[in-house]
Amino acid sequence: MEIRSLLLFTLLHIPWTLSYNFTSIYSTTSFAEGPNIAKPGCPSKCGDLSVPYPFGIGIRASCSINHSFDIKCNSSFDPPKAFLGNLEVVGISETQIRIKNHLASICNYSIDNSTFALDLSGTPFSLSNQNKLTVVGCNHVSLMSKDSKLDNYISSCIAVCSKPQELSDGSCSGIGCCQASIPKGLQYIATAMLLLNNQSDNDNFNPCGYSFLAEQNRYSFRASDISDASFVKRTMDTVPLVIDWAIANRTCNESSNIICEGESVCVDPGTTIGGYRCNCSRGYQGNPYLSPGCQDVNECEFNPCHPKAICINLPGSFNCSCPPNYLGDGAKYGSGCIFLPPPNKTALYTGLFIGSGLFILLAVSLWLYKVLRKRRAKQLKQSIFKQNGGLLLQQHISAHDLVLGKMRIFTSKELEKATDRFNESRILGRGGQGTVYKGMLSDGRIVAVKKSKQVDENRLEEFINETHLTTKVQGTFGYLDPEYFQTSKFTEKSDVYSFGVVLVELLTGQKPISTSVTDEEKSLVTRFVLTMEENRLHTILDSQITEQGSKEEHLAVANLARRCLKLNGKKRPTIREVAMELESIRACENPSCIESNTPDISFMEEESSQFPDDGSSQTQNTFRRVNIC
């Protein structure tokens, strides 16, 4: 028989009855304890079940917060039983109620009891996801839908087996028993119990299959449940159905009239139907829905402190403290209270005196040790300094201060830092006296540091004397600033001179140094200055230059180059002034503009020009080197 053909049935709303006392299992909670459980003038118990407000006993008796929370107490039972509508209530807690369960079944291929429906629509109640859809049987399936048409399934479970030997107690993973989760917040469910096939091999040991909602961890499968005739009654009596409840249908933020009383807080239950609940603050208990609200719990009544400790009850808390001569936190499960015998004052004073004396003696000894160690290190340093020629080095520095400039002696730490701990990559060369490293001082100066291989007193003077060296400055001689020969220094105006040479090159089309003319005419700068003094600039200009531009432009650029070639660097323009003048020459479109923007230039020589005539581009520059013994 196909599964879809078995879905032709009628959903049954079956009144539930109670035949087992659940009170000892579910009804005792802090919510249902204290003097203010029910509303004043209303009963608080139905049989053995405590009924706390907002629930109330009596239909429209004004004992509950609203009619949805009315509990009917049926005294025809012994003891009386509580009903919420037609649902038998077996337990009430701060967040949930538990009702008596009902099972759908298929026995001997009969589907008369194979359906079950629960409708909580329009109430502040919804199914808890602590329930599990459970199926017990062989080749049985249960389908759960959230509508009466059974075409919107939300959960399903299949249990299969072929012989009793396959079943195992406590296992509900699909062999003889299966469980499946359900969504939270459902207010309507309909379940259908189906048989997968018509095999009759299992009829002897499995005549029936069952489907029900079971509170999680409340049902434990037994292999005998497959054929046990008392299974239905035992399950209904011991496995309840869990339902969540909340006040109204708005959350704490949405509600304008929250009924939470003193020392309680409003919390959102997190259900899909909304609503809120009231919880007592920590350290308080009672009914948060009834005035005066939650009451402070006297934790000291529960003996939370160590037997020797003193317990002090505080609002919402407590404090444990140890009496005099006891040490500890006073807590029963903490460090407790440990007895400390009264101290002997004489022994205490003696100990303090001896301890203070030892401390002072130790401090003085440590200070003396550091002073002596520092003095010894200083003496040792001076001794090594003298041994390595330090006095000779100082005499050498004093004798050459005027010639070499101010000099200083560097410490080994400074030289290690300058040479990156004498890194191999810093080596400039090696010699008989030692190894020379390239270093950089903290002020950015580059130095050469010579580290001696060994100390030879006979060669100390030779080693110390090598504190300076000369290096060759190489380049094209024709661009070199003449001031360098006098000062051995390059300045910003040196670049201006070199740029002036470049301008002359562009104007004449010739190189700075010529090898095809006489010694007197080797220097292009000399020849250029001479032609300008003799007012025959046109004789040295390149033909391509004369064909382009005007004479005024040629003269303006030539005058600018002449100013850049002044022997006195202070009389040369800055490189910025040169750039501005070139820009102004280029911007002028007529000769008068160029004349007005070009300063008067005197071609009279202001200082004598002395150029070497050997074409050499080498001179001498001082480079500092530091020796390390």
Image: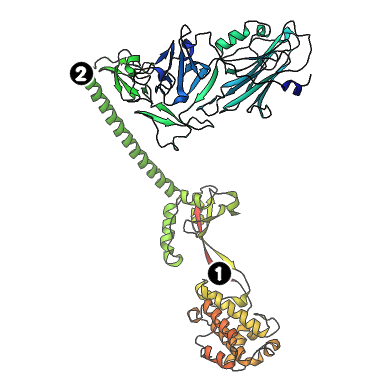
The image quadrant of residue 73 is top left
Q: Position of residue 239 (x, y in %)?
A: 56, 13
Q: Secondary structure at mark 1?
A: strand
What mark, if any, has residue 620 been given in the picture?
1
Q: Residues within 10 Å of mark 2 (few under 14, many from 20)?
A: few
The image quadrant of residue 129 is top right
Residue furthest out toward the left: 346
Taking depth in this image into account, of 304 and 603 the one nearest to the observer is 304
Q: Secondary structure at mark 2?
A: helix
Q: Disc 1 residue type?
A: Gln
Q: Nearer the viewer, mark 2 or mark 1?
A: 2
Q: Could you tell whether 227 is left or right of 45 in the image? A: right
Q: Position of residue 340 (x, y in %)?
A: 28, 15
User: Does 272 sit above or below residue 29?
Assistant: below
Taking depth in this image into account, of 551 and 613 the one nearest to the observer is 551
Residue that numbered label 2 is attached to: 346
Residue 379 shows in the view: yes
**Location of the N terminus (image quadrant):** top right
What mark, if any, has residue 116 been given in the picture?
none
Q: Disc 2 residue type?
A: Thr
Q: Position of residue 285 (x, y in %)?
A: 37, 22
Q: Could you tell whether 340 is left or right of 510 in the image? A: left
Residue 629 shows in the view: no
Q: Position of residue 245 (x, y in %)?
A: 49, 25
User: Does 262 sit above or below residue 616?
Assistant: above
Q: Give the spatial CA distance, label 2 vs label 1.
A: 86 Å
